Amino acid sequence: MSMKILILPGDYIGPEILAEAVKVLDAFKAQGEPLEWRFAHLGGAAVDAEGHPYPPSTKQAAHAADAILLGSVGGPKYDALPRELRPERGLLAVRKDLNLFANLRPARVFDELADSSSLKKEVIAGLDILILRELTGDIYFGQPRGRRVNAEGHDEGFDTMHYSRPEVARIARVAFEAARKRNRRLCSVDKENVLETSRFWREVMVEVSAEYPDVELSHMYVDNAAMQLLKRPKQFDVIVTGNIFGDILSDEAAMLAGSIGMLPSASLDANNKGMYEPIHGSAPDIAGQDKANPLATILSVAMMFKYSFDRADLSDRIEAAVRKVLQQGHRTGDIAMQGEKIIGTREMGDAVVKALG
Ligand code: IPM
Ligand code: MG
């Protein structure tokens, strides 16, 4: 069975880091793996080429693919565009269009990088947590939203936060299943003391937990979770939370791992079709300079093999190769300690391919 991949390089450093991921695909293909891939536009690149951040040609290709690899979208060139044409809209549109409701954002600290976090080594050494972010609901997509004149006659902007029972129940099940494969501890993060949406979210979490008596469910308010992630991050195993809280907490968790340039992510539908992308953005400040760290993207390829293609063997080989290049001392600027030799995006990609064997 061939593995059909759609590659969406996106904007700024997107094409640079994706080029290194393609080197990994090339290496596996040369070894006889039935991999096929094609490219399409998303985000600003798609606006430039086709006038829309998620054009019909990309939509069609996305539906036809088994899995999608995405670089990053957005940047200053596109900031002045009307809201519907902003690159971020393209990203949100694919997530929604393909029903990619389960966003897995693991935060793991490689031993070799335990010194490059801004937190003390003993706080983060050995850290391995998984943040599960609901990705197609919440205030990100809630209607109504927009501008209006309020009762006092003032202009205002407004959005709507809501979650339905099926939406919460399905992310809950993904989270409980994930916890089952790890240390069987699930922490649901909400703002139940203030928000109706969160009260409901918590109720459904508790209901679903009855199906998973072997997993320990706990609850935490999001403000406390933000604090605990810095204070004692190793207390967590799996965190499950809504779209907006997950957006914020996963950036915070990324910094625990030393650099946001190290963390991959997967966004899955109910059948494990997925889109895989680094957690970081398009880094306009270093674009085109061969400076970006391609490891988060390469680790996203590893997640793709594991989750969409059930090929843990290939996934393990990529992760082992990344560990090896770190052990060998290869560092891009974002993960280098003072005085360490810094290599470029392409050299890092080549080192990983070499380490793959
Ligand atoms: C992310 C990003 C996106 C989000 C933006 C680019 C729309 O921050 O993937 O975390 O908010 O979901
Ligand atoms: Mg984000």
Image: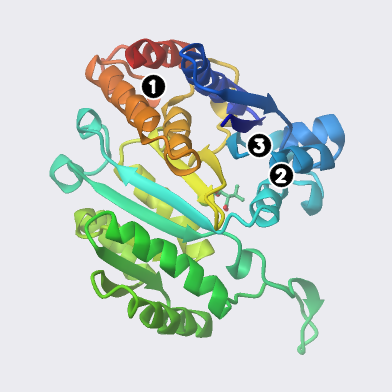
User: Is 247 in front, or is 205?
Assistant: 205
> Image check: 183 left or right of 348?
left
Asked if marks 2 and 3 touch (Cβ < 8 Å), the reply is no
First reached walking from the N terminus: tag 2 or tag 3: 2
The tag on residue 333 is: 1
Q: Kindly report which numbered mark, 2 or 3, lies closer to the viewer in this rendering.
A: 2
Specify the label residue 20 is tagged with: none
Q: Position of residue 283 (x, y in %)?
A: 55, 32
Q: How many marks?
A: 3
Q: What element does badge 3 sit on?
A: loop
Q: In the structure shown, which secondary structural element does the residue marked by tag 1 occupy?
A: helix
Q: Which label sits in the foreground, 2 or 1? A: 2
Amino acid of disc 1: Gly
Q: Position of residue 83 (x, y in %)?
A: 78, 53
Cα–Cα gap, marks 2 and 3: 26 Å
The residue at which mark 2 appears reads as 63
User: Where does residue 339 sit, x and y in percent of width and height?
Assistant: 26, 15
Is residue 53 at all visible to an observer of this figure?
Answer: no
Query: Residue at coordinates 62% horizontally, 32% vertically from top-left?
Result: 4
Q: Residue at x 42, y 84 (%)?
A: 203
Tell me the tag on residue 75.
Answer: 3
Disc 2 marks a residue whose amino acid type is His
Instruction: Give neighbour class at mark 3: few <14, some 14-19, many 20+ (Cα, 10 Å).
Output: some
